[in-house]
Image (cartoon, helix red, strand yellow):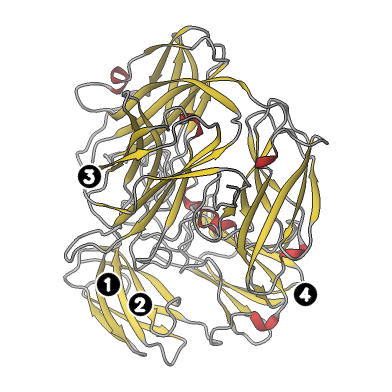
Amino acid sequence: MKKYFLLLLMLAGWAGSALANPGDTTWVQAHNDVHLDWYNNFDTTVAFPDGSASYRKISMTVTLGKYQCPAGSQWCGDWDYTVQLFLMTKTGDTMEIGRLITPYANASYPRTPWSWRERYIFDVTDYYHLLKDTATVRLHYSGYSGGFTADVKFAFVEGTRDRDVVGIDRLWHGNFNYGHGNTPINTALAALSKTMPSSAVSTELKMNITGHGGDDNACAEFCPNQYAISLNGTQLLTKNFFRTDCDRNNLYPQSGTWIYSRANWCPGALVHTITHPLQGLAGAYNLGMSFPAYTSTTVNGGGPASYTIEAAAIYYGAMNKSLDVSVDDIVAPTNAEYHFRQNPTSRAPIITVHNGGSTTINSIKFEYGVTGMGTQTYTWTAGNLAALQTMDIHFPPMAGLKLNPASYTFHVKVLEVNGVADDDMLNNELSSTFNAAPALPSGIIVKMKSNEEGRPGNNSISQTSWRIEDANGTVVAYKGNCPVNTICTDTVQLNFGEAYRFIISDSAQLGYWDINQNSNTGVWQGTGLAGYSSIAGYVRLFNAANNGNILIPMYYGGNFGGGFSFDFFTGFANAVNDVNHTDLSLIAYPNPARDHISFEVNGSSDAKGYISLINMMGQEVITQPYIHGTQQIDVSQLAGGVYQLIYHNERDQNMRLMQRVVITH
């Protein structure tokens, strides 16, 4: 049956995702919203297709959700835990086919309420010869608390694969102590002797690796490191696998330390598989893996360092197609939650394409548009796309994305590749559902209060800056020299009816949701985890015509990590979200506090709602009603540390004001 399905890499789900190409697709359900609790394996027997059909793409979607834990439970969906998906067949084959990390998902946060759902999508096509008949799918959950649900399903899309897999060897697997224990990690990672099948023409080493533990040097979670791979006794490569983009996580803000760089993982994100081509293999070979020498100590508490490793050698036959481009994803415009930071857009589409043929591609002609509003064409000629490579293509500015507030459908189709039709027409089209970007007035006031974090080499200038770009990426307004701990106000006049992007950047990757300098948490700076400013900042927008407050999309009390951006266009003035013509703020004092905290919502005469105090583990430790005026909360019995004071408006559930407070005794 030929239908459209919702997916990322050929995957269906909810409205707002990409719609797959026409083709015969078989769906297989594995885990069905199972409740994850304690450190456990969740196994389910799955009846996969019998393998008689050819599948060009197989994808696995793990959808996390939440459930309310029993009364008295701690940390309900509040922590970053490892989730591993294993395929176990009757013949004894066991392969990890996906890994992700749960987010800090306290229900008090705007992106992770009790109704929260998030999809994590894996391309598992390489395991097609194991994903058949009856097999067991194991979900291993490393969490020591409950609160998360997990749904796992597979999509089998019929067609011709890029290349066939002629063999798989499972290599190093398990959890390996690093710098402690009776067996050194390089002894445990013994060299392996394998044989490349005679029918294979290429081999790739695929590696899932994550670092865990927080010893005296914050290793291995926060500790940059590298591994070395040797082939037949000679070092082939070294790989630094520290992940430095956590501050740009699409799932933000979270209720914990989501912004910090980590050992190949980020809270609330899937773990990216590292791929190493093994060139020149033939017949028998030896493969080795090693780490630098290290001693893990926990004199000051914490857990010793370790690495969770799953590696495999995958052997491939020849390419099955000569000339083939697939449209794998629509990054923008889309409502897909895994592209939250790139949307909504008023400027230009972004498309992910893949070269599934043996021929290098130097031109692709696309047809695209918003359904019901005509189509246009664009020919990409900006480089070369080698065989098996994937890339994002940024289309030219598209005037048709400046739309009235509503939901729309975007469609893209490949017409030609290198000037001709390609070999496989079934993977050339994709659609997405999206919401229009907001309209703002052409005259806006940008008010930015900097914190006390100065730039390296110039501590008097703030690390936080903002800029506005037009549809072509040209900067039309910029504030990059605001002094620390200062309110900088700028009025910007933009052209009516044009598309723009507002961008906030923080060179320290911290946003405005700062952490006390006496805290032991922070980002790795080579010798330890550094603390941060105790003075918070903010950014606010106002209508220059009437000083009305403009709600900023994707801005959550300054908790944006390394920065954020949002698209808008100037027009439809009546659609501007003008809240109440006031500059609302939550004031808390003394800060730091010892016995009590006084607080007030400033700028409103009717700020009815409730106030909550959240600790750094995301736990709600105090909640009480709030009516306009100054009130107090008793904190004398709370542990010292950094807390978040949050005001929730009774009438507008989307209105939340946050203030970082420090308690000392």
Residue nearer the viewer, 48 or 410: 48
Farthest residue, direction right? 419
Distance between the alpha carbons at the discs numbered 3 and 2: 39 Å
Earlier residue among tags 1 and 3: 3
Image quarter of residue 470: bottom right
Tell me which amino acid carries mark 4.
Phe
Distance between the alpha carbons at the discs numbered 2 and 4: 40 Å
Horizontal and vertical percent position of residue 121: 48, 45
Please determine whether, in this image, residue 485 is positioned above or below residue 588. above
Residue nearer the viewer, 293 or 138: 138
Numbered circle sitting on residue 588: 2
Tell me which amino acid carries mark 2.
Ala
Image quarter of residue 382: top right
- For marks 1 and 3, give the one nearer the viewer: 3
Horizontal and vertical percent position of residue 409: 65, 62
Distance between the alpha carbons at the discs numbered 1 and 3: 37 Å
Farthest residue, direction top? 283
The residue identified by callout 3 is: 39
The residue identified by callout 1 is: 593
Tell me which amino acid carries mark 3.
Tyr
Q: Is mark 3 on a helix, strand or loop?
A: loop
The residue identified by callout 4 is: 496
Earlier residue among tags 4 and 3: 3
Residue drawn at point x = 54 percent, y = 57 percent:
336
Horizontal and vertical percent position of residue 384: 74, 33
Q: What element carries label 4?
A: loop
Tell me which amino acid carries mark 1.
Ala
Numbered circle sitting on residue 65: none
